[in-house]
Amino acid sequence: MAISIFSIIFAIGLILTLLPPADIASFVEKQSTAIATIASALLGTITLIPAFIAFPLVGTLVDAGVGIVPSVAFLTTLTMVGVVTFPLEKKEFGVKFTAVRNGLSFLFAIIIAHVMGVII
Amino acid sequence: MVLKKIKDNLFFFIIILAYAIMTTINPSMGIESVKNSGYYIKEMLMIMPVIFVLTALLDMWVSKEKIMKFLGKDAKAKGVFLAFVIGSISAGPIYAAFPMCVMLHKKGASIRNIIIILSSWAVIKVPMLLNEAKFLGPKFMVIRWILTVVAIIIFSWIADKIIKDKDLPSEETSQVGLIINKGACMGCTLCTKNYPELFEIKSKKAVIKAHDATTIDKEKLQTTINACPVKAIEYIED
């Protein structure tokens, strides 16, 4: 448990050196909001980062200039939609339940992100 | 032995290797990466005690067992509210909630309330809100919290219209005796501390020791079952 958390943190440290937050921000800026949002939501579904590391990480990215909408989409799908946990969920609740819950969560994560973008 | 250790912690060794390669090629980038990681470790160590204490306090103050009684199909608005409460105060990743929700569904909780528990368990943890406010600002946190709650209320209602009770696998629990749900167990070792005569940890999961069923201390076992944070222990008397 502890080892995997530290591994994730050191992986993030490494990635942020190779891809500085400012570069990530300027790359995201060049994309249309819709594409950036869907891409970051997809990234959120396939990664398994504990939330207490995800918040400072997204904080760093937002400070560097990454837009609110993709950031929120990433944060929401990160915790609510799980490709990695899909088999486990399917075993406990069945295919239909798992597909509907994850699908709706993904859809609403994108809606939440866009509404956030309008308000903030 | 060494190979097995590497295989178990493959990701960790890949990261170490990546650091070694990068530091050899470009030492300043290696130092930069360690500095970056150090920032997150420092932040994590500062926020973790707060999260742990808050989670423990919430667990103590709010009796989950009492709330679960109110989660049936006729619970309506009160059930929705209580489902949010259960999800928001609980600790651990979303998969830790699966066995508990299956149990609640067997006891009559609606699909809607189960979706609410799972979703709020995932996104709106009370101790995590502090963390979010610290790094992204209180305004960001409050708005995201409100929008998420509204979204969960809407999509749990939609999901309830699509999914029927019969879509969930109904396991015939013909098995009697003591069972550990291996998929749910996180290897936290609480059971081995509460009832060391009956439980032990093998390759990071709890297993039941060979025992004489007649000598089980029911009271001690019940305490252990209640203590399990993911409700992975089940005991059906014959």
Image: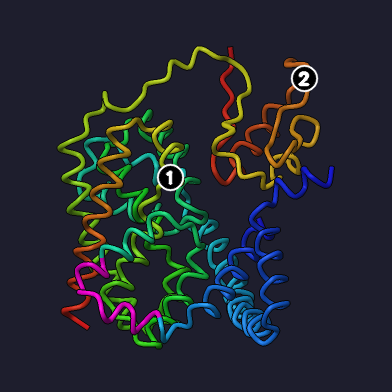
Q: Residue furthest right?
A: B1
User: Where residue B23 sits in the image (x, y, percent)?
Assistant: 70, 78
Mark 2 against mark 1, which lies toward the viewer?
Answer: 2
User: Where residue B138 sits in the image (x, y, percent)?
Assistant: 36, 83
Q: Residue at x 46, y 69 (%)?
A: B128
The residue singled out by tag 1 in the image is B66
How far is the residue under mark 2 from the one under mark 1? 30 Å
On the picture, is A71 further left or further right than A18? left
User: Where residue B174 sits in the image (x, y, percent)?
Assistant: 50, 12
Magenta span: chief secondary structure: helix
The question of residue A47 being in magenta is answered with no
Chain label for disc 1: B
Q: Residue furthest front?
A: B25
Asked if marks 2 and 1 fall on the same chain, the answer is yes
Q: Residue at x 55, y 57 (%)?
A: B60
Q: Residue at x 30, y 76 (%)?
A: B142
Residue A12 seen from this side: yes
Of labels 2 and 1, earlier in sequence is: 1
Q: Residues within 10 Å of mark 1 (few under 14, many from 20)?
A: few
Place residue A101 in its image quadrant.
top left
On screen, residue A54 above or below B9: below
The residue singled out by tag 2 in the image is B215
Q: Residues within 10 Å of mark 2 (few under 14, many from 20)?
A: few
On screen, residue A33 above or below B227: below
Disc 2 and disc 1 in contact, CB within 8 angstroms: no
Residue numbers of the magenta segment: A24-37
Locate the C terminus of chain B and report the quarter of the image it occupies.
Answer: top right
